[in-house]
Image: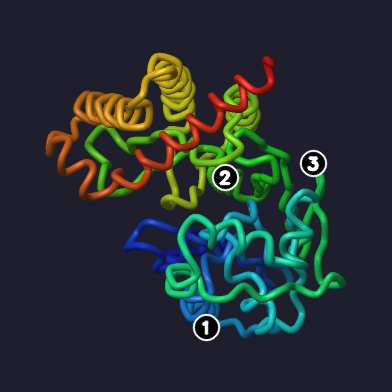
Amino acid sequence: MSNEHGIHTIDTGFVRQHFDAAYLVVEGDRAAFIDCGTNYSIPRMMAALDAAGLTPAHVNWLILTHVHLDHAGGAGELLSLLPQAQLVVHPRGARHMIDPSRLWDGAAEVYGEAVMDETYGRLLPVPSERVVEAPDGHVVDLAGRPLVCLDTPGHARHHNAIYDKKANVCFTGDTFGLSYRALDTDKGPFIIPTTSPVQFDPPALHASIDRLLALEPEAMYLTHYGRVEDVQRLGADLHAQIDAMVALARAADGRDDRHEALTQSLANLYTERAEAHGWLKGREALEALVLGMDIKLNAQGLEVWLDNQRHAAT
């Protein structure tokens, strides 16, 4: 799928259909990928390039919003197929692309080696000479089209959003939440924040959302999933939910069943909000269709944040 500004949405195939997006931005005969999914997403990335009438040699850039594996796991594999391209990444993420062993080891501790191989494939390092560190305000020049990297922490400390001035849109990674098309109603998109482990920072996330909204973009392009408009309403929804989720986390803290209690209260929150949005298929369908994994991850991220707050106070 593409629009008049040469922006192509690529379903990376990660987890399920319409869950994880990457993007191809075309300007003249030059192109940039924004995020890339996993190693198993690479055929889809190359197919999108072919569908746009371009070859691997036409790609100048692979720009990462951050280095979580659903966004960046296939970077080394993809770069090996793009002879002219450089990798653009937040300074805090660059070392993990040059040497992805810590990314792999950390995830393998949680999921196990077999699951990692099946889900992501082995991570290939990116040669250091092909890595461009992008601090706040760094401009990627795509054939004269500026793509501005904006330091937007809150979900991760190594997170950039990408502002495309020509199209007046932002590629938001995970900073501007999750909005699955299966939850759209006649009121428009439904959205929730992502607080998944391990660097959730509520004040920083509020500030990052406000920074993106201040640009008054026509649309946001989310990794999970696709283009959303009505961005001021969605931003207000995100702000309200971040505060509500923090309150639920504080209420559950200290309980022996903290994780279960928080998971249940988050599911209740999202169900109530979805019903108010006109999505009337019920909580079980909400969890089964789209949000079950996100609820668990959000609970885990809130718990890490609670524990970090406690340690910081001692």
N-terminal of the pair, mark 2 or mark 1, is: 1
| Left or right of residue 185: residue 75 | right
Q: Which residue is mark 3?
A: 136
Task: Please determine whether, in this image, residue 280 is positioned above or below residue 16.
Answer: above
Q: Are marks 1 and 3 in contact (CB under 8 Å)?
A: no
Amino acid type of disc 3? Answer: Asp
Where residue 102 sits, quadrant-wise, is bottom right
Q: Position of residue 167 (x, y in %)?
A: 60, 49
| Left or right of residue 61: residue 26 | left
Q: Which residue is mark 1?
A: 50
Determine the CA span between mark 3 and mark 2: 14 Å
N-terminal of the pair, mark 1 or mark 3, is: 1
Numbered mark located on residue 172 in the image: 2
Q: Are marks 3 and 2 in contact (CB under 8 Å)?
A: no
| Residue at x-position 73% and y-position 47% | 149
Q: Position of residue 156 (x, y in %)?
A: 63, 41
Amino acid type of disc 2? Answer: Thr
Where residue 152 sits, quadrant-wise, is top right
Task: Please determine whether, in this image, residue 72 is positioned above or below residue 29.
Answer: above
Quadrant for the N terminus, please.
bottom left
N-terminal of the pair, mark 3 or mark 2, is: 3
